[in-house]
Amino acid sequence: MMTNSTRRAFLQNTIFGGAFIGLTNRLDLYNSGEELSVETAYGALSPTASANTGEVFLALPQGFQYNVFGKTNSPLTNGLPTPKLPDGMGVFDTGNTWTLIRNHEIQGNAGEPNSVTGTTPYDSAAGGGTTTFIIDKQTRLPINQTVSLSGTVRNCAGGMTPWQTWISCEETVAGVSSGYAEPHGYCFEVSPNSPNNTPLPIKQMGRFSHEAIAVDRKLGVIYLTEDSNPNAGFYRYVPNEYGKLLLGGKLQMLAVRNQPNYDTRTGQTVNAPILATWVDIANPDPVEAETNQAAVFNQGFALGGATFTRLEGCFAFADKIYFTSTNGGNAGIGQIWEYRHHKGSNGILKLVYESPNVDFLDFPDNICFGNRGDMFVCEDGSNGNFIRVLDKRGAISPFARNIIPSFEFSEITGSVFTRDKKVLFVNIQSPGVTCAIWGNW
């Protein structure tokens, strides 16, 4: 029987030894004497140098390449240093270019090293925001890079909208009591066509520790995750007018029909349908949120809302909404959920994957979908971080790994495919770099 450390070393040696593992072959692992298997969809990983600089950041399967750019402290087009801590991203097709918007998960103040500096900040004391990169489709490298949102705090993830904007989310409820000039904990809409967006918080989308959003393309409903531990809610914002988020709407929290305060964190069954409904949040922007991070959650919970933990990545695919619970599940290392809207205030919630072991999935975070309908899952664990692929059958396998010396435990963030599914953009949060990956999808 392999111990955890021996099994991990075996897995790493197999991956980095360069031995080919076919699509239908199996890599057998052992957990407490019980055999488990991982199918490798793209082949064995091996250290791969970036095509444009020759530096080694990632281990990838054979037939894949990547460029690196957007390094922390490298100059933007205006000469200012590129901000640190890149996180969630959105990419837009803009003719001969892609427009890539990157969040920066900066908690600190404006003026600190590698903070975001813009000309029209929401809060002049805050150092977070977004940068926008114009990427040439032929070279897969930026030809322009600017600040597009500033004066915000801890812009973690967010999501793209069908009306071609990026929603950037603040993962905080800090405000004046923390030394800022404005309250924080909001979502902001960023246009890819504006070099420096005027920041307007969408306060009716709630003041809580936001993570990511996904949009129901048909209805324009925004689904939102809350990164809070141990109690988090899964929310939706029903706008009064499609695509006009600042014109107001209704914030709601998911509940399970006839089971008030349903606890999803443990004891769940994969693929078992759960009847879901929604309860209204009467005050989405409570004053007490600044001193009580759970002020919005508690309103929904009092009406029977369901409890999750550390909800992070969120993505719309095939008329469903997928989201991750980073430390949910019996093993406490990750769940992936699916929500399908039915009609009215009804829907079906379903657990589609729960990690039994860190060798399969370790703290899932940002997610997106590739051309096969496979989910690409970024890890934010402490065991070395991968991008994993969860296929439609429920099999999971590694696709890429961060192997930057001294930064190999930094999280991989911001996964997003171009519209044609030929290029995958991801960040490695520290030391702060963006990779554009292409190859044999």
Image (cartoon, helix red, strand yellow):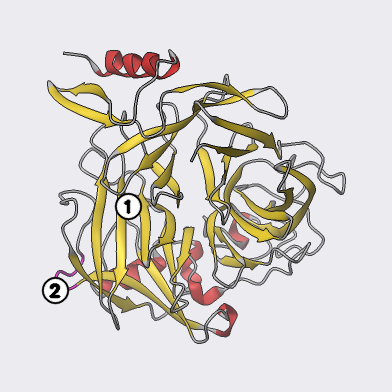
Q: Position of residue 244 (x, y in %)?
A: 58, 81
Q: Which residue is mark 2?
A: 258
Is residue 16 placed above or below 130 in the rendered structure?
above
- Specify which label sits upstream in the sequence, 2 or 1: 2
**Residue 129 visible in the shown view:** no
Q: Name the main secondary structure of what is drawn in magenta.
A: loop
The Cα atoms of the two marked residues, 2 and 1, are separated by 21 Å
Few, some or many residues within 10 Å of mark 2 (<14, 14–19, 20+): few
Is residue 413 placed above or below 400 in the rendered structure?
below
Q: Amino acid at mark 1?
A: Thr
Q: Relative to residue 380, is residue 144 drawn left or right?
A: right
Q: Amino acid at mark 2?
A: Asn
Few, some or many residues within 10 Å of mark 1 (<14, 14–19, 20+): many
Contact (Cβ within 8 Å) of mark 2 with mark 1: no
Q: Relative to residue 98, is residue 65 drawn left or right?
A: left
Q: Secondary structure at mark 1?
A: loop
Q: Quadrant of residue 21?
A: top left
Q: Position of residue 220 (x, y in %)?
A: 47, 77
**Residue 245 visible in the shown view:** yes
Q: Position of residue 424 (x, y in %)?
A: 56, 44
Seen from the viewer's position, the closer of residues 77 and 115 is 77
Q: Which mark is drawn over residue 309?
A: 1
Which residue: 67% across, 34% down?
Answer: 68
Q: Position of residue 255 (x, y in %)?
A: 25, 70
Q: Relative to residue 47, is residue 198 drawn left or right?
A: right
Seen from the viewer's position, the closer of residues 234 and 165 is 165
Which residue: 18% across, 73% down?
Answer: 257
Query: Does 113 appear in magenta?
Result: no
- Over which residues does the magenta segment extend? 257-261
Q: Which mark is drawn over residue 101?
A: none
